[in-house]
Image: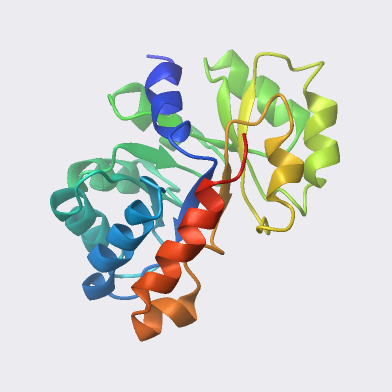
Amino acid sequence: MAQDSEKLLSILKLQPVVPVLIVDSVASAVPLARALVAGGLKAIEITMRTPAALDAVRAVAAEVEGAHVGAGTILNARDFDAAVEAGSTFIVSPGVNRSVLDAAKNSKVPLLPGAATASEVMALRDEGYKVLKFFPAEQAGGAPYLKALSSPLAGTFFCPTGSISLKNANDYLSLPNVVCVGGSWVAPRELVATGDWAGITKLAAEAAALAV
């Protein structure tokens, strides 16, 4: 099946910023997710970049009320299937390959695939995808580049991710083809390491207040 855009958009539109998390310890995953949800960020992406990541997805999915946990940095079908089994409600990839696309066709969990060029966007449109991750956003041309795509590739929507912060988030959120942005600034590693959940909730609330 093609991308279930409506299901994916129902998650991404919960908030203007999707936290992109690197979780080093399963023990921190649940309180971190609860802090983000308390600040208004319910859709959470946990990247598969650490040994703890898959168990972190599983813990958040099982224990954090109100959270919509997704798995990011999915590079192949094996990781796609493992993330779905762990409880992911959406899947994010930095780019795309046939392995990931084939896994997505056989899954009810929607894929947010990455694209950085007009050609990549066109190829994904041919596969039935209209909601994409623009990555790496700043390095690939930033908000001006994405704005330039809005007319020739009308009907395609993006979640830009990559070096986005509170300072430049609105540059993207003001664009007609942007649904939300992805950002890691809402959960700084130093605050996670010290267990400053109140500080993370404050950052999440600031991000949740951004206009789309």
**50 lies left or right of 27:** right
Q: Is residue 151 above or below residue 157?
A: above
Q: Nearer the viewer, residue 26 or 52?
A: 26
**175 lies left or right of 71:** right
Question: Could you tell me which residue is drawn at 50 percent across and 63 percent down?
Answer: 203
Q: Is residue 23 above or below residue 175?
A: below
The x and y percentages for residue 199 are 44, 72
Please tell me in which quadrant of the rendered image residue 176 appears: top right
The x and y percentages for residue 120 are 68, 30
**75 lies left or right of 86:** right
Please tell me in which quadrant of the rendered image residue 143 appears: top right
Q: Is residue 201 above or below residue 82?
A: below
Q: Nearer the viewer, residue 170 or 130?
A: 170
Question: Could you tell me which residue is drawn at 55 percent across and 25 percent down?
Answer: 131
The quadrant of the rendering that contains the N terminus is: top left
Extreme left residue here? 62
Tally the marks.
0
Question: Could you tell me which residue is drawn at 21 percent across and 62 percent down?
Answer: 55
